[in-house]
Amino acid sequence: MLSAIAEYDELGREAFLAHYGYGPSRGYFLEHDGMEYDSKAIAGVAVGKQFPEEGPLRADQFSGGDATVRAKLEALGFRVRASTESSRVQINFHDIELLRLSRDRDRYADISSEERAAYERVHAALGQLGRIVQEELGAADYDLRLTSGFHLRSGVRGALPKDLWFGVYRRQNATEFLGNPQLFAIVSGRGVELGFYMSTHPSDFSNSDLKARLRAAAPAIYRQLPDPGSTAATELERSLGSQWDFRRKSRLEPGRREFDDLSAWLRYFKSPAGAQEGGGGITRWFTGEDLDAADLSAVVRDMAHTFQPLMSSIRATADHPPLLAPDQPARVGRSFATLFNEMAQKFGAARQQPFGQVPDLWNLMEEIQTRLDNLASVAKRPHITTQWSLGKGVWASVPWIALLNREVTTSTQSGIYVAFLFSEDLSSVYATLIQGMTHLANELGRSAAVRTLGERSESYQGQIGWVTERGIKLGSEIDLKTDKWRVRQYKAGTIAYELFDLRDLPSDDHFEEVLEVLLKAYDQIVGVRPEPAVQDLTSPPDPAPLPVEEETYSLQDAMSGVFMSQEEVERIIAVWRSKKNIILQGAPGVGKSFIAKRLAFALMGYNAPSRIEAVQFHQSYAYEDFVQGYRPTTAGGFELRDGVFLRFCQAALSDLSRHYVIIIDEINRGNLSKIFGELMLLIEQDKRDPGWATRLTYARPNDRKFYVPENLFIIGMMNTADRSLSMVDYALRRRFAFVTLPPQFSSPQLREHLLTADIPEVIVDRITSRMIELNEAIANDTVNLGPGFQIGHSFFVPDEENPYSDGWYEMIIETEIRPLLEEYWFDEPKKAADWRERLLSG
């Protein structure tokens, strides 16, 4: 009978309930080995009784004629208790320490039995606390969610869960408000934070779609807050007392408040500036001895009573009153030139006084951090976390803002990261790719640490020489206007940089271009490829517990803009579905990347970018990047890290009911046998099951064997005009289906699309007729070129960034087509020039 528990754990509550046809269960708790389970579902399956689908298990169902149900359950080892019998719930600081220590493990599977027991105790306690809150608010109207995707046996998608949490939200707000506002508790290595947040801060999300949906919903949530000074606000402030902090977001350090009182907090978030920022929480922390002494069950019960008026009054279907008129400048969204200059002025004034928190300055730094978090270059990298410092105990000579890959380092004292360093005289700021030195200096001594950093910098610079083409300098010639040793560490650790004069800062667009280059170089050095839609498998779970709704995607959706017949698209998808692996090959400009993503969505049936991973092969790309290998650590040693393919397979394995797609650009440019290794066998369509599981090259003795799941599909892309094209060996050709995408200048769909884009018919005729002639000449030049060098149609498809205008056609010929022709006929320059003239004539 206890197999019901195993199945419940394996499927998760929602899937288990759906499978057995039970509605949500409240009223009685079932405990087994310290864990709590849904009373209706487990009771029904364990004792073979079908309870009513709607409503909770009632008291009379465990009495009278159904008393045998309770007796059977207790005989099976359950403890049956009513919700009113709730006992004191505690989370002790010893378990917090065990969670913190477990962060040193690579994976959840590697943690000690003691640490695993701590996870189990904390997870169980959070379940009890969440149910108390849910019942106090009214179980019929509120839902409870626990840590996203967390399973006591395997962690979060096979990785180490960073924080454990519960969130309780009004069921009515699940869709439109994404489960906001919430009452929550988050357990991390610092302690327990709990409280009320109105709207999860967008920077806490790694999914760009969720960010956008939350930003759209936030103003409607904030409008329903009580006005400052109103009766409701006065009663809430009286209930809160002095134990709560008014915050911009959750997961900030303990003991810090951004607002002096509830009125200031309400006034800000009901203003246009606050509504634009997002976030907003009223929280409190329990750490150390305070945590050991706390009765958290009583605390969350009081929390539910305190915030019940807010939780019940904010509804997705309510009328939304207007925002308050702003009584302060709207600061979110200001330019970095404005923000950095204001920061320099405020910091310069603050450091004339003894060190201490200056609320306006701290708020400004939070604003800068929020602006950085919401830049596209940062938002598409869920592994990046932002930190800043103005000093600790004394004012910093060089204040800084850092962007760290949390898989590499969580501290600026070690590892590699991107940082903005302000000179001591506050006249300039350097955007740098830099190494932390403090830990290394403590280990090796200052002189040896400087030498070691210099050697590493030279090695890293050799990998990212391309950044100089983007205006970034390689080297460590930065001048922070001070000779202090701590500041000289920054110089020693600098890999690449760009200098900005604070009196003449560039536009935000240029600022983000520089940041994107540095972050891309950072990813390259540490072996990470960012993709905006892919969730980093080792990142902390999003605080918002609701799943993302994916839009359906039909074959007709895929047809838009591909200029192919529907029959051809259907054939490609059918071949891919059967073969599992497919390669799109074609000349430059035939739309391989564009078509690949649309084919992926059509295969999945959903517009689901989170289930697509993209990589690009190159001559230096290796098995260690793609599958698994050892990487250097900041301490000078090496550690085993999973590559992008292995991490993506883990995601697919945890979600076998849905398709996952990995897109490999320039697949022919890599050493394929070297990159795929034993995967050359495992990616075959008839080898996609556990029976073919094998040990990976770098597997440790206790690692499980690996296989490629059947729900993972591979699509590669090859440019047939690549002169560095190496032979694609037979072994790969046997495992992939090859599809050639020709130019579509003769396609009626292309012609119709160009006319719809307001391109004059005479220009459309010129494009189609002359490019068809040019491609015939290229195809017939079998000595130097051939069909694989024909030029694709996508060069002539306008978009929002390059719409049709006077001179549009001529610009494409001069900037796109002419360079190709000169490369094709480099030994016949007159031929290239003649064709340029023919394309431009008339």
Image (cartoon, rainbow, N blue to C red):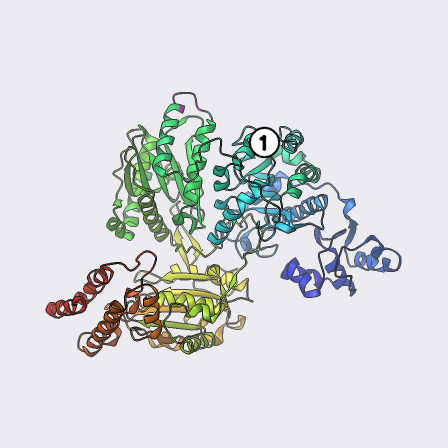
Mark yes or no: residue 17 visible. Answer: yes
Q: Quadrant of residue 222?
A: top right
**On screen, residue 286 above or below 547:** above
Q: Nearer the viewer, residue 84 or 821?
A: 821
Q: Position of residue 590 (x, y in %)?
A: 31, 69
Q: Is residue 224 left or right of residue 39?
A: left
At horizontal 46% and vertical 60% (from top left) the residue drawn is: 609
Q: Is residue 169 left or right of residue 810?
A: right
Q: Is residue 351 magenta?
A: yes
Q: Is residue 71 magenta?
A: no
Number of callouts = 1
Q: Quadrant of residue 355?
A: top left
Residue corresponding to mark 1? 228
User: Which quadrant: the N terminus?
Assistant: bottom right
Give the extent of the magenta segment: 350-355
Q: Is residue 552 left or right of residue 417?
A: right
Q: Main secondary structure of the magenta part?
A: loop
